[in-house]
Image: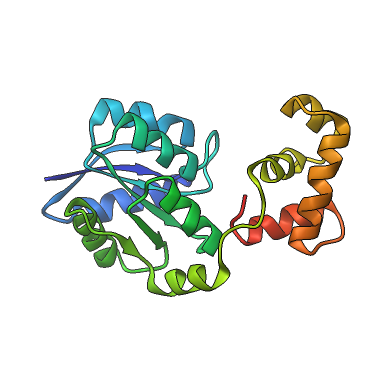
Amino acid sequence: MIRVLLAEDQGMMRSALALLLGMEQDIEVVAQVGAGDEIVDAALNSRPDVALLDIELPGRSGLDAAADLRDECPECRVLILTTFGRPGYLRRAMEAGAVGFLVKDGPVEDLAEAIRQALRGETVIDPALAAAALSAGPSPLTTREADVLRASVDGATVSDIAEKLHLSESTVRNYLSAAIGKTGTRNRMEAVREARQRGWL
């Protein structure tokens, strides 16, 4: 049996996926979680062969959790399953050690086969998304510019961001200015929106 951990914050979607995958003769869902910060503990307890992770999760993103699993449970293969097929997300998922990236609107048979492929050591990527990622190129934002944009999400002031990231206010302004320039936007809220849309945050 292929042991699967499922991380999805929408309860109905999580239950439906678990039910559908459970109908496959060779797949058993051994753990289900609704938040990103529960993934590693659940994996350590249930020892899954494959972890299916959503990206947008409370507590910790599926991309961050994928990197955690690579370090804490290296024997577990990670597949990202998301509504948001953004090229930047695909690149970040691969960098975090995921072996697959699929969008949720595909048939469950394809998902079951992707789980089998992942266990065989194959890489499974939605073809349209792979093409888009190659044409989009890498994120132009530096790690610090991305950090500053993330800290801006809830309308935090420059002072708030500086305190949170242990930077000077002038350094925060410089990073924001650079991020705004690189995203081709007029202000930091637009920069956040554009960077999220492209999957850079």
Q: Is residue 109 above or below residue 74?
A: below
Residue sitting at 42 percent across and 62 percent down?
104
50 lies left or right of 150? left
Colour treatment of the image: rainbow
What is the total number of numbered labels drawn onto the structure image? Answer: 0
Quadrant in which residue 106 is drawn: bottom left
Q: Position of residue 8 (x, y in %)?
A: 43, 45
Find residue 139 and report its image quarter. bottom right
**Residue at position x 53%, y 47% in the image:** 56
Where does the image place residue 159, in percent across and percent down from the top left? 87, 30
Instruction: Describe residue 51's horizontal placement relative to residue 149 as left or right.
Output: left
Q: Residue 42: where, in percent of width, then height?
A: 33, 29
Q: Is residue 86 visible?
A: no
Which residue is nearer to you in this view: 142 or 109? 142
Nearer to us in this view, 12 or 146: 146
52 versus 91 height, above or below: above
Query: What residue appears at the point 24 percent right and 30 percent down from the top-left corner?
Result: 46
- Residue 99 shown left or right of residue 159 in the figure: left
Q: Residue 46, relative to residue 107: is it above or below?
A: above
